[in-house]
Amino acid sequence: MSTVKVDTLVASDGTSPVTLTKQSAAKVWANINQSGNSVRGSSGLSSMTDNGGGDVSINFTNAFDSTNNYAVNGTTGSNASSPDSYVTGPDGDRTHSTTTVGLNLMNFNGSINDQSVLWITAHGDLA
Amino acid sequence: MSEIKVDTLTGKTTANDITVTVGATATQSLEQGLAKTWVNFNGTGTIAADDSLNLSSLSDGGTGLYDINVTSAFARTNHCSTGSIIGDGSTSNRSYALVASISSNTTSKIDIATVNANVTEAYRDYANISVADFGDLA
């Protein structure tokens, strides 16, 4: 077995992204208290914008290389004992760019409401 | 193109911290970007994993309620799970949701629920559930 100890990995040209064989790293993950407007833990998240009532914009630290070339996956919920909500988006009323995506936390009755739990990930190539 | 063949990569300064170039100029922590747990499992009947990473066991908490127990614990309870469900094709409205419940999450357990998001808004078992979890391991 071989082990390489290294602090930084970069492609051989000195600038290009590193290819991970049969692996792809998530560029963003975040555990958000959306109703409390706070972030419990994250990577690649610059900020969250509370647009009110379960309408939220997620802002990335690093830009993706294209607006349509990254995928966001979200799970939401609350501490309630009954099932309550799911994530929809991108929200067409909000900016959708390489650095921002708008999401709605949708209750099963069709209303949009704040939730105490919002978990998101984003995968794709960065600029 | 150059290629390094190696079995293990370890941070030189800090064991779990390797910076990788992930864009033209952007860099990020390799450790942060890797899923620490993932599982595809059958949540009907006697629940069972089809394939997984860092999974110690699955617990059935009742209809549509599951605990995903991990082998290597997370550093904190603030880890992040996302996932999806393949419907069974027989349920009206065909809208399915993976619901998070952080109230009983621990560093070694992910608490999720699967729901048929039709008018009954009912917890429901599904045969094909996929979950991935991100965060720092202990």
Image (cartoon, coloured by chain):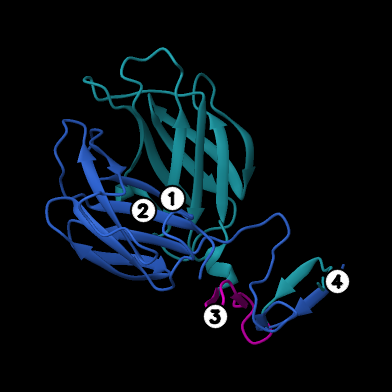
Q: Which is in the foreground here, disc 3 or disc 4?
A: 3
Crowd around label 4: few <14 · some 14–19 · many ≥20 (10 Å): few
Spatial CA span between label 1 and label 4: 32 Å
**In the rendered image of this protein, does residue B8 appear above or below residue B50?**
below
Image coordinates for residue A69, horizontal then vertical, percent:
48, 55
Q: Chain of mark 2?
A: A
Region of the chain picked out in magenta, as a range: B12-28
Residue under pointer 1: B81
As helix, strand or loop, the secondary structure at mark 2 comes to strand
Residues under numbered marks 3 and 4 in contact, where contact means CB atoms less than 8 Å apart: no
Q: Residue at x 84, y 68 (%)?
A: B5
Residues under numbered marks 2 and 4 in contact, where contact means CB atoms less than 8 Å apart: no
Q: Pinpoint the chain carrying mark 4.
A: A
User: Looking at the picture, which amino acid does disc 1 mark?
Assistant: Ser
Q: Which residue is mark 2?
A: A119
Q: What's the CA distance linking mark 2 and mark 3?
A: 27 Å
Residue behind mark 4: A2
Instruction: Choose between B22 and A1: the one closer to the eye.
Output: B22
Disc 3 secondary structure class: loop
| Residue placed under numbered mark 3 in the picture | B25
Q: Is residue B137 visible?
A: no
Q: Quarter of the image holding residue A56? A: bottom left
Which chain is represented by blue in the image? A
Callouts 1 and 2 close, C-beta under 8 Å: yes
